[in-house]
Amino acid sequence: MYYEPGITPHGLPHDPFKSCVIPRPIGWISTVDAQGQDNLAPFSQFQNVTFDPPIVMFASNQNSRGERKDSVRNAESTGQFVWNMATYALREAVNISAEELPHGVDEFERAGLGKLPSSLVKPKRVAGSPIHFECTYLNTVRFPGSSVMGTVDVVFGRVVAVHIDDAYLTPDGLVDVLKIQPLARMGYYDYTYVDNQFRMVIPGNNEAVLAGLEGSPDRVRASGPQR
């Protein structure tokens, strides 16, 4: 099949676009507004952008009323947000926190989630989530859309603190992905989670390349001259 998005019809019962870029990690983002009201929402367009320094992004479409979402407004106004690892065990809470609700509703409470204080930022962390990134806001790139919800705000933040539950580290100090079972977004109404893994190392002995693959700034810097 072949179609041109927004120009020619795809002829399928459901739009396939989101089902072609999979699986996508979930940006379970907690924020707080200027009045101290907590907010929590999942975003399926989330990713780390670079590792030295560590920077992440989440992309937020507008709500069904054509308004910017609270997560974006809060991150911009306070300069802070937290990413919480979404897991298979927390899948129902993730789904509940995705509901479009009036401003001021606390999604932590609605989803039955506990709150943990952060170390360097004001937004709370999700209790029970095994990994958290405390982030300071960098900037927003806004792309206009073709529909009310099509317009998107891409929010970038620098990770200033990382929390990892010791129970989810292997004896040799690696993040135990299979124990965490990270939740990931597919297309349509479908999700998946990580329940298997395999290892590949790029051929060659370029220490800088291998350190970059690992995401280790210290090893990159120690590997040789930096340009």
Image (cartoon, rainbow, N blue to C red):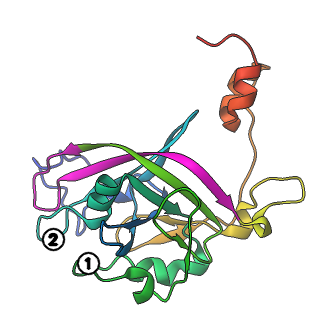
The residue singled out by tag 1 in the image is 100
Q: Is residue 186 magenta?
A: no
Q: Position of residue 63 (x, y in %)?
A: 19, 68
Give the residue displayed 38% in from the left and 81% down from the top: 107
Identity of the residue drawn at 68% across and 24% down = 209
Mark 2 crowd level (few <14, some 14–19, many ≥20, 10 Å Cα): few
Q: Give the secondary structure at mark 2.
A: loop
What residue is shown at x 17% (from left), y 53% (from top)? Answer: 151
Which disc, if any, is residue 178? none
Quarter residue 13 falls in: bottom left
Quick one: 197 or 118, which is closer to the camera?
A: 118
Q: Is residue 149 visible?
A: yes
Depth check, front residue: 225 or 39: 39
Q: How many marks?
A: 2
> Quick check: 128 left or right of 58?
right
Q: Residue at x 61, y 80 (%)?
A: 89
Measured as percent of width and height from the top left, residue 53 is found at 56, 35
Question: Is there CB contact under 8 Å for labels 1 and 2?
Answer: yes
Magenta segment, principal secondary structure? strand
Residue type highlighted by circle 1: Glu
Choose the circle earlier in sequence order: 1 or 2.
2
Give percent across and percent down for residue 160.
56, 47
Q: Amino acid at mark 2?
A: Ser
Horizontal and vertical percent for residue 57?
41, 48
Q: Which residue is mark 2?
A: 64
| Marks 1/2: CA–CA distance | 8 Å
Disc 1 crowd rating (10 Å Cα; few below 14, some 14-19, many 20+) is few
Residue extending farthest to the right is 171
Tell me the magenta residue range: 142-164
Residue 16 placement: quadrant: bottom left
In this rendering, would 57 be left or right of 126? left
176 or 122: which is nearer to us? 122
